[in-house]
Image (cartoon, rainbow, N blue to C red):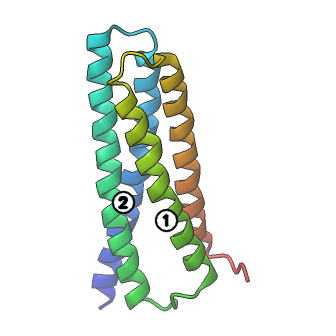
Amino acid sequence: MYNFYGLIIFTHVLSMVLSVGPLFVLFAVLKRMHGADLAIEIAYLAIFRSVVRLIKHAGHVLVGSGILLVYLGPWPWHTPWIVMTIGLMILSIFFLASAFKGTLKKYENPDFDRQVLNRKLYSSTWTYIILLVLMLALMVMKPTLW
């Protein structure tokens, strides 16, 4: 049983790394998008979409392994750090869907200012990183909140 639980912990940690790590690549992509030709910008947008897709699927593994860890582990569902993590996770799901997908869709419209969209993607990336790091802190520190 311990080996299986350890494998789930490893999967959970690895999926967290895959959920956060690729976000930092997006900063380099955004920097290169600044002033790029339309053809080059389309290629960078494809990279951006791929990274967001990777993050989304790693998040699915993260949630699934997290559910297994709580189900098989010593903590009940009403533990404060678990409740807060679930709340932040729900917030991050809605944020990921609206911030990235909606903004990336606007690049298809030539009337939108590309620099404004780049700044929005930049701030959205930092916001999403902060949400994920807060969830990570709750899972690692397991604070007693109430």
Q: Residue at x 37, y 66 (%)?
A: 62
- The disc label shown at residue 59, or none: 2
Q: Is residue 114 left or right of residue 48?
A: right
The picture quadrant where one finds residue 112 is: top left
Judging depth in this view, the residue of 107 and 135 nearest the camera is 107
Closer to us: 118 or 67: 118
The answer for how far apart the CA atoms under marks 2 and 1 are is: 11 Å
Of label 2 and label 1, which has the lower sequence position?
A: 2
Q: Position of residue 124 (x, y in %)?
A: 53, 39
Return the x and y of residue 49 as percentages of the image width and height: 31, 37
Q: Secondary structure at mark 2?
A: helix
Residue type, label 2: Gly
Residue occupying the point 63% across, 81% down: 80
Amino acid type, mark 1: Ile
Left or right of 109: which side holds 125? right
- Mark 2 or 1: in front is 1
Q: Looking at the rendering, which quadrant does residue 15 occupy?
A: bottom left
The 10 Å Cα crowd at callout 2, few under 14, some 14 to 19, many 20 or more, is: many
Residue at image coords 34%, 83%: 5
State the residue position of label 1. 90
Which residue occupies the foreground of this view, 37 or 107?
107
